[in-house]
Amino acid sequence: MRRVLNVLQATSLGFDTVDEASVYACTGDPSPKDIRLITQALLTSSVAETFELIRDMQASRGLALGDIMQGVARVMERAVQPAKAKAALFSALSRIEVRLASGTPDKHQVGALIAAFVQMRELLEDDGDDEDDGGEVLIAEEGG
């Protein structure tokens, strides 16, 4: 409760209005909209486009890669996808977190994050060749 009050107080001091956008800006956390945009890019966009999007969001909004990964992991945890692809993705995400904690530069780990999703896409494509419902990730709506 105290943390919530501190965040609201800091937001009211730093912004004219206290709304969702100003709270996320004050705390430096990625908003659900940011996470959806990044996740969609990781699932569908090219490596270069996704890299540029994530690095631009980090620079312009002050987002930490660890926070981005945490949000993306929550989305992907609820996603409907083959177990093999999900296991490979979360294994890669855990290795990236370890490297971030040991001081590896963010820029390198953004590349590793994108590579993990590219590998997952390849696994899904391979599954899609064998099954009618493979090759696709269904993202659960928030709150659902």
Image: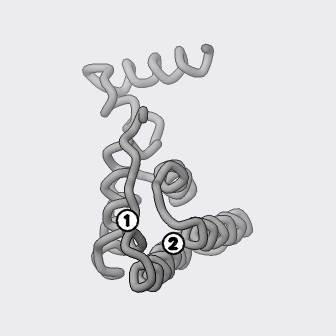
Image-based side of 100 in relation to 14, left or right: right
Q: Residue at x 39, y 20 (%)?
A: 13
Quadrant where the C terminus is found in the figure = top left
Q: Would you name the residue on which mark 1 appears? A: 54
Q: CA distance from mark 2 to mark 1?
A: 10 Å
Q: Give the number of the disc on residue 113.
A: 2
In the rendered image, the vertical position of residue 77 relative to residue 117, given as above or below:
above
Q: Residue at x 45, y 53 (%)?
A: 63
Depth check: 131 or 28 in front?
131
Q: Three-letter amino acid code at disc 1? A: Ile
In this view, the mark in front (2 or 1)? 2
Q: Quadrant of residue 118?
A: bottom left
Provide residue 81's location: percent of width, then percent of height.
48, 63
In the rendered image, the vertical position of residue 140 relative to residue 127, given as above or below:
above
Provide residue 129's location: percent of width, then percent of height.
40, 85
* Mark found first going from the N terminus, 2 or 1: 1
Count neighbours of disc 1 (C-alpha within 10 A) and say few if under 14, some if 14 to 19, many if 20 or more: many
In the rendered image, the vertical position of residue 122 relative to residue 8, given as above or below:
below
Depth check: 10 or 136 in front?
136
Q: Three-letter amino acid code at disc 2? A: Leu
Q: Residue at x 29, y 74 (%)?
A: 45
Number of marks: 2
Q: Quadrant of residue 96?
A: bottom right
